Amino acid sequence: MRQKFNKHATDAFFERHHVLIKPKPLNLSGDIILEIGSGKGDFITQYAFDHPNTTCIAVEMNRHVCYYIALKKEALDLNNLIIIMDDAALVEQYIPKNSIAAIYLHFSDPWPKAKHHKRRLTYPTKLDMYGRLLKKEGQLIFKTDHQKLYIESSFYMQSKFKNIVFDDDSQEEAYITEYERKKRPYGPIYKIQAGAYDDTL
């Protein structure tokens, strides 16, 4: 769904709220999680609030929804949350290799037309990028309500990760997105958890 224009989502607003809008290498240490395509930030802000010793990174390129993540960060006083407003394809320009414990992809755009499949956040070239960012024991967690994307993503992931768990009807967890909350009553939520990235597969 296309988000409504938000006149308050200006560069000046994001600068005041310390949202990163240009590539900048981050100096990171300790436990770090990354959510790509954070939407309005329900998942990442609640997780950050309950895990103050974990550095949480939200990546969202749509300024009209990224605005709400910044508001929630301020309201909850989340000093452990970093917000990046940029294309996911550029995330390696911010985050060092082998530093992330978990990457979350929640309800990404399915890009159903074959000519657009390379834009999917689960496409093999994207998976290679996540593999470079993840620690050796790091995990990639993907959720969707789009069955075709789930099936095709399962094949993508089997070409890149050795340890994969598929769940055709995942149960509600402690931290969920606004989208998941709305969609759960209407059908299954599919989940894939992948680890042991191997670029030789």
Image (cartoon, grey):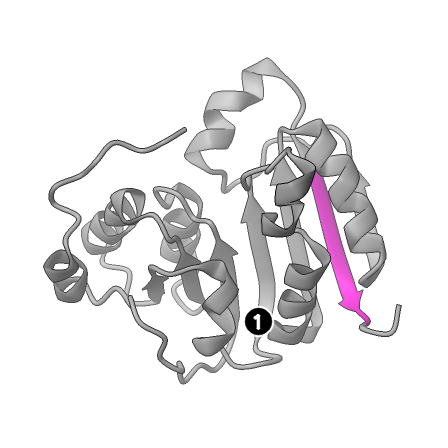
Q: What stretch is highlighted in magenta?
A: 191-198
* Residue at horizontal 26 percent and vertical 43 percent from the top: 64
Q: Which of 80 and 179 is in front in this view?
A: 179
Residue 184 painted magenta? no
**Quadrant hosting residue 5:** top left
* Callout 1 amino acid: Ile
Relative to residue 164, is residue 201 depicted above or below?
Answer: below
Residue at (68, 53) in percent of width and height: 123
User: According to the image, label 1 marks what residue?
Assistant: 100
Residue 34: % across, % down: 50, 62
Which residue reaches farthest top?
A: 186
Say if 173 sits above or below 69 in the image. Answer: above
Q: Is residue 165 above or below residue 127?
A: above
Q: How many marks?
A: 1
Residue in front for this viewpoint, 40 or 47: 40
Q: Position of residue 20 (x, y in %)?
A: 29, 68
Taking the image as shown, residue 138 lies to the left or right of residue 48, namely: right
Which quadrant holds residue 169?
Answer: top right
* Residue nearest the observer in this picture, 37 or 1: 1
